[in-house]
Image: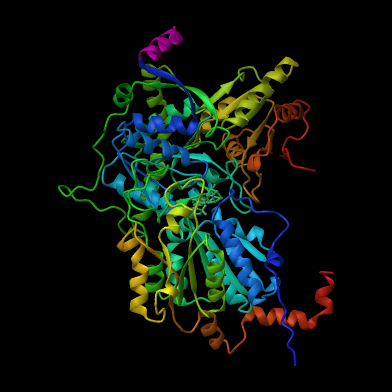
Amino acid sequence: MLAELQRGARERVVSRRAGLTTNYAVAHAVKAVDVDVVAVYPITPQTTIVEKIAEFIHGGELRAELIHVESEHSALSAAVGAAAAGARTFTATSSQGLEYMHEVLHIASGLRLPIVMAVPTRALSAPISIHNDYSDIMNARDTGWAILIASTAQEAYDTVIQAYRIAEHPDVQLPVMMAYDGYLMSHTLEPVELYHEEHVRGFVPRRDRRNVLDVRSPITLGAFATPDNYYEFKYQQEVALRNVEGVLREVEADFAARFGASYGPVEAYRLEDADYALVTYGGAATGNARMAVDMARERGIRAGLLRVRLYRPFPSAPIVAALAGVKAFAVIDRAIAYGSPAPGPLYKDVATALYMEGLTVPGISVVHGIGQRAMYVEDFYGVIRMLAEGAGTGKVLFLGLRE
Amino acid sequence: MTVKIEVRKPAEYAVARPPIWCPGCGDYGILDALRRALAELGIPNEMVVVVSGIGCSSQLPHFMKTYGIHGIHGRALPIATGVKLANPDLTVIVMGGDGDGYAIGTNHLVHAARRNVDVTYIVSNNQVYGLTTGQMAPTTLKGVKTKSTPYGSVDDPVNPLALAIASGATYVARGFSGDPTHLASLIKGGIEHRGFALIDVLSPCVTFNRVNTYDWFKARVYKLEESGHDPSDLMQAMAKALEWPTMDPYGRIPIGVIYRAERPTYDGEMSRLLKGVSPATSQIDNALSEGPTILKSFI
Ligand SMILES: Cc1ncc(C[n+]2csc(CCOP(=O)(O)OP(=O)(O)O)c2C)c(N)n1
Ligand code: SF4
Ligand SMILES: [Mg+2]
């Protein structure tokens, strides 16, 4: 019944089906939500997003100001200024660019500015690599931004649209980062259903009630905070970020009604009766894990998959609920948290979330796909086998490492 | 009496691996000119360090049989400053693109020039971001269409030579990759010069810049040595620096030494404070005099 309703809704809103890279899908979403200011500095694999936006502006399809600044530090700074002045603002970067923005990431969240940023993820220097992993956003995970990780081009398109609703929501007013696999998604074609822009604009109306720089009612942003009040600012920021999970659900309910699609903070696959679970994020790891789960099921192992889509704030409740019933789980991380109790950043979060609920489900911290080392379905199937044999739980696996 | 002069060949600074630039890229001319300059000066390979940022041009250290550091985008000059101060005996060459040096790393140009750090900074100026495949650079002429400015750039370009002179650089030159012999003489002059040397090189990106081509530059460049220019005259130098692209972006382009001056260098001043011995060099010297024990671990 719901599915039919959703199909009906989609027929009305979809303008066309196109083969797009995730970068182009993002650019189409930016156009659809009608941003005012885009400030950027080029970096592979982000570049084609901005080139597409430039084409839209050139063709008169988007009325926006595109500022080609001299670095990422300036790109996010210009976005901060534009958002403070009331503009709907977009930026995008990858890898070293996100590192170079780091200082300003905290300014954007501290000033509570609803900037949306796309991050096709990429490995970090040194040594230099242009290939994909998630080291860049993992270094930005505690900067007070909401972070969503998409796994398909369609989801990236939908998420950018949802991101503005979330960022501009009165209970949130925070910047939102939307990440996905650099190259593996940013530069590969997938079918994407694009929406009639009036429907998108109806879904993300201008909300001009937030405090912006306006001479008619002057405000100061970022003023000095003494030990008497700094803490309260930071606490409010934490509360606002935690509001994102509820707001995302609310926004997604409306999105589902209008566009017939929803994803949730986490997505489960064949998990209802699973004994063993893989936990992933992003496109390639999730796609391969899904096939590994099918492979295991064919061989009589009850395996399932949990994909984390909302990464900050961390959706502990649905993750704990999903893993509470399994015998063992493994988290596939695409980054290394150097020197941590476990090398996988997401693993650490999952383990903490379980521990805080008093649960001790055996788990493995798996690292794979560093600097785009090829990840094979068999690798993930091997992990499921290990879980089923009770081997390796509580351990660490660096998969795909050359002997 | 005959004096035996050791003659070195440019090929002695080459590695076996050929460069990975596109055929025809201006950076081949820079590589050729740099090797020639080092050979003419007879500087031993192990006394040369080439430091670069990120960009097509910043790949250059990979093709030199010298020491090299391929760093991060925009930060070649601070790294080079560290190298030079730690061991002033080294010849430090810095290589990067116009994006690397005149956009994300501009502030370092200003400060290295003002401190008069004794390094030779070669900038491959191709008016585009080559490595990221053809977006507008800070040197792109106003109105030029690039992948990021399909409507034509609305930004005015930076004038790196005027900026360097105003910041205190003591050797400021412009070369052209299409004339590697002339360029080699400019680089040689920069290395010989005691102080901060900027050599901006018009270096066509044949793949992503269809405007500023070899022919475009050939039709515009003229040599300062042949035009009675006095590089020791600051005001004349500033006027020459402003000629292109500031005064007329489509006019004639002077190449050659634009400005040259003498001023104490940063490592010289440091050395004076430290009474002549840099801490790192003295450690290396001690290590060498201790010889056997230390060397054993490397043998
Ligand atoms: C912090 C950071 N931002 C962006 C990039 C992406 N990037 C690599 S090279 C480059 C510019 C290249 O242009 P240029 O310096 O002119 O060198 P060219 O390739 O033209 O020789 C950019 C923007 C990066 N590597 N690091
Ligand atoms: S893209 Fe341009 S700058 Fe880069 S190697 Fe090719 S020709 Fe040279
Ligand atoms: Mg360049």
* Left or right, B247 with reference to A249: left
Residue B223 position, x and y percent, is: 44, 69
**At 57% from the left edge and 41% from the top edge, which residue is drawn?**
A134
Taking depth in this image into account, of B64 and A172 the one nearest to the observer is B64
Main SS of the magenta part reads helix
* Left or right, B129 with reference to B292: left
Residue A2 among those drawn in magenta? yes
- Taking the view exactly as shown, the residue that stands out farthest to the left is A216
Residue A199 position, x and y percent, is: 32, 21
Quadrant, the N terminus of chain A: top left
Confirm whether residue A247 shows in the render: no
- Position above or below: B268 against B61: below
Taking depth in this image into account, of B207 and B161 the one nearest to the observer is B207
- Position above or below: A329 against A303: below
**At 29% from the left edge and 24% from the top edge, which residue is drawn?**
A202
Q: Which stretch is magenta?
A: A1-12
* Left or right, A238 with reference to A332: left
Residue A216 position, x and y percent, is: 14, 47
